[in-house]
Image: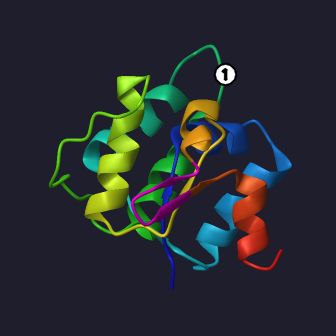
Amino acid sequence: MKNIVVDTNVFISALLKSRDCSEVLEALKRGRFNLVISEKLREEILEVASNPKFGFSEFDKSELRELLAEKSAPPLAPEEKISVCRDAKDDMLLECAVTGRADFIVTGDKDLLSLKTFRKTLIVTPRKFLQSLGK
């Protein structure tokens, strides 16, 4: 089974009902891949989901917390500090991918997508990732 890092923007877009992002979360719920996550990334996902500007219900936020708890591997601590992204906050995804030996980073972030790969990890859109699952 593939190890995958899913960017915060994919989770948020799924809650906002983006079709491809919602399908990525459905694939996670069905156990189609292993979610690799760090504590820092988990905290960011939950913090952004709690931002009032999105207006997510308590139910949506609770469901997201449960999904992360049930379907991710235990949060890992990055073993290496990486500084290659224009936006330093994106480096945590690369650190997570390297430590968790991720096959993919799934993101909508154009800066990350422009890298295409980092070491052995492919960096793809939700649609490309779904295609790799045969959707």
- Can the viewer see residue 134? yes
Relative image position of residue 127 (x, y in whole percent):
78, 57
> Which residue in the structure is indicated by mark 1?
55
Q: Residue at x 31, y 59 (%)?
A: 98
Camera-side residue of 32 and 100: 100
* Depth check, front residue: 61 or 37: 37
Q: Residue at x 61, y 42 (%)?
A: 113
| Amino acid at circle 1 | Gly
Left or right of 73 on screen, residue 8: right
Q: Secondary structure at mark 1?
A: loop
Specify whether residue 5 is painted magenta: no
At which x and y percent is residue 21?
73, 50
Q: Relative to 97, does residue 14 appear above or below in the rendering?
A: above
Q: Is residue 79 above or below residue 83?
A: below
Q: Position of residue 106 (x, y in %)?
A: 59, 53
Q: Which quadrant of the view contains residue 23?
A: bottom right
Position of residue 53 relative to residue 4, above or below, is: above
Foreground of the two, 52 or 18: 18
In the rendering, at what x and y percent does residue 107 appear?
Answer: 61, 45
The magenta segment:
116-122
